Each structure stands twice: as C-alpha cells, then as structure tokens.
Amino acid sequence: MFRAFVTVWIVTTTLALRAAVPLGEAWCGTDGGELPDLWQQTVLELEALEEISRAEAWSYAPGRVNVFLSKFALLHRGSVRQGSETMKAVRQTKDALGKMRSTLVDAATTTNVTVYTQSVTTVRTMMEDLYSKYQPGSLKLGIAKINPKAFLPASPTLTVKAISPALVSNQTVQVDLRLRDGKGAGVGSLQLIEMHTRRLHVLAIDPALEDYHHEHPITSGRPGDFVFVMTPKRTGNYLMWLDVTPLATGRNEAPQAVIGTGPVLTRPISKVTQMQDSIYGWKFDLRFDRKKVVAGLPVNARLRVTDPQGKPCFGLEPLMGSFAHIVGFLDDRNTMIHVHSHGEPPHELARSGPEVPFRFIVPKTGFLKLFIQTQVNGNVILAKFGFPVEQGTSSTEVLSNSAPAVVTGSAGDAR
C-alpha cells in the first residue's frame, strides 16, 4: 500500500476594494489573524444581529452582541499593523460601537423590536462608513501564485494498520489499530498532540463515498494499540485516514489503512452536484465565493443552517473545538481534505449560526464529496454535499480572498 500525505500552505493576497462591492464581499478571507479574515468574521456577526429580530431569537442576542464586539476588538488589534490612518478609523468605530452595547442588549432583553432594529441599522451604517475609510494599502492587491513543489508529499513518520472482521451493513464491528513510527515502534497517545479535543481522529468512508464515519479511538493496551467501534451502512471494506499529530514533529499526518478483509471493491461514485441538504427538517446550504472550484486554489465557503420551521439557526454548539467540522473525499479515493470553521476554539457555552465560514483547497481535479458535521441541542447532524473540482486555465488566478490555508491529507492507493 502506497501512502502519501500532503499539507499545503498557500499564501494569497486580495483585490483592491471597489465602492460597488457589497459590504464584506471583497474582505472575505481566511483564518490567520489578517484584516480580511477579521473583517469577514465581524461582518458575519453583524449579519447575525440583523437576523435575530426576524427570527425572534432574542435569547441569543446578548451573547452575540458580545461576540460581535470581541471580533471588532480583534479587528482593531490587527489594524495596528496596517498604518496609523487605518488604525485610527478602526479605533473610532470601535469606541462608538462599545457605547451602543447596552442599548442593543437592553432592547433585545425587553424585546423592543423598534429600538433594536434602529440600533442594528446604526451599527451597519458605522461599518459601512469604516469600510469607506480604509486606506487602499490596508489590503494588498495581488495574484495567487501556486508553487507546484508545495504539493509534493511530505515525508510521513507514522504508519497505521486496521484489523477487523469483514464489515456487514448495519452490524457494529470493533476495529483494532496499530500505530507505528518509522522504526516499527508503537506510538502511544502520550506521544501525540491533542488536536480539536482528541489525539486521534478516524475518518472512514466506503468506496462509493457515501457512508462517512468520524470516530475517536482509545488506547487498548500496549503503546500504539488503539480500538474503536463503528456501524457501517454498507457491506465491504472502508477506506480510512487516521488524523494525528506526533509530538516529535508537531506536524499533522494522515496515514491510511483499509478496514475490513479482502480486496477493496470499486463501486460507482455518484457525481451529481449537491449544494443543499436536509436532515430531519434542518436545512443546510453551502455557498462559495466563486462560481467554480479550481484545483489548488483557496475557496472561501459559508454553511447556512435553518431549523425545521424555516428560521435561521442561532444555536449551533461547539463540536470538536469548532462550530463546523468539514471532511472531503475526492473521487480518486486517494485524496482527503480536513478543515474546520474559522475562529479560535469556542467556549463550550458559546453558540453560533446561522452562517459558519470556513476555507478549503482541493489539490487535484475530480469530484469532491464534502461532509459537514454540526451540533444542535446535543445532537450531531451530518450534512452531505458534492461538486466538481475543475482544472485552472493557468497556474495563477486572481482571488477575492487572502490566506494562509491548509489542506490535509492525500493518502495513497488503498487497493
């Protein structure tokens, strides 16, 4: 079995702003502390405040007002590096917004729709005014330059073997894992760094790329021996990536294995584009900042969630250290991407929605099946999407976003 692993960091810059661009559009960026990303997160919180009155989600308003102001404080901190004029404009707006906190919270607490709506409108006016005062140099004009060498496989230090009986649909099975380093020695949990609340993440999928499982193995005895259980919906082998970060290197790896017995059966993969999903009345809409996904180029995405009554969902709960957990599998059955929604790991009592931003890069052309996990009322909901990944016309393309961004895991031939 050939194993390869790719971790790609791609740095891009943004287009200059134009007055005709809607607030927030050209500022859409990635997680990394840069102004475009900080602005995007702040605008998303503003949009959430605007929707609270329409959704009558008043209980979430005080917390979201605080989150909005916290995001703006981070924006102010980031503006220091962009010059005195930008910093001054942001500071003035920050001070004015801070004075409005009590008005917004009081109006939401007393369900005073008129005062709340007027106050949020004032906030948007302030943001639009700030938008017009940014110096042109605060966001650099640029073109994304793709370095082909960035996609060369990194040298893996770990291997994994999965041991299990034959997998039968709807029958729970125990899977034993053997995690080893380059010398064949077992790698125990204390030799791994906890990432997103766990030291080991199993990402498994059937060859048709339909039945996705995210499991967390536990130590089963000797160092390097782990175990987990799963209930496959399909009979036959499953492809598996183990997402781990060894303490020795601090670099994320995704060694691959096959769960089950016998050869991997190649089943047809449905390639119908799907940008919406509905589970138990909950609706999930996937939105991109571009018309098509191009291999090797960053994509800024938003997941919008509405409840069974059709109202925007403000109650998304933290799941594995983020508000959305995103895993994708390309139709070559060898490439996996693994990312999380923007922002620092939220407090367990924090809530988000109705839109969650994230970013991803697909290193190859093909058809990508994307699985997004969210949590509401303690229940994990898995939404499924699918879309083509096209070849770019050249090695460069003008982007409306900025980065760094990370793509995790091209795993090798599983046959």
Image (cartoon, rainbow, N blue to C red):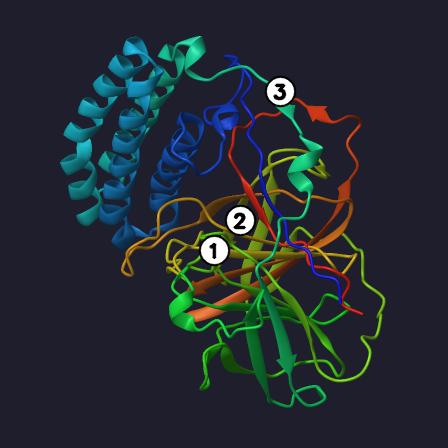
Q: Secondary structure at mark 3?
A: loop
- Determine which of the numbered discs, if any, sits on residue 143 in the image: 3
Whichever of labels 1 and 3 marks the residue nearer the N terminus, that label is 3
* Mark closer to the chain start, 3 or 2: 3
Please report the residue visible at 53 percent of the width from the left and 49 percent of the height from the top.
Answer: 303
Please give the name of the residue rendered at 72% of the width and 39% of the height, measured from the top-left corner.
295
x and y, in percent, of residue 238 in the image: 70, 75
- Which corner quadrant holds the C terminus? bottom right
**Residue 387 horizontal side relative to residue 299, left or right:** right
Q: Nearer the viewer, residue 326 or 17?
A: 326
Q: Residues within 10 Å of mark 1 (few under 14, many from 20)?
A: many
- Asked if the residue under mark 1 is in contact with the one under mark 2, i.e. CB atoms within 8 Å, the reply is yes
CA separation in Å, label 1 and label 3: 29 Å
Q: Residues within 10 Å of mark 3 (few under 14, many from 20)?
A: some
Q: Is residue 327 visible?
A: yes
Q: Nearer the viewer, residue 357 or 168?
A: 168
**Residue 333's spot in the image, x, y percent?**
76, 61
- Gap in angstroms between the C-alphas marked 2 and 1: 8 Å
Amino acid bearing label 1: Ala
What residue is shown with label 1?
Answer: 324
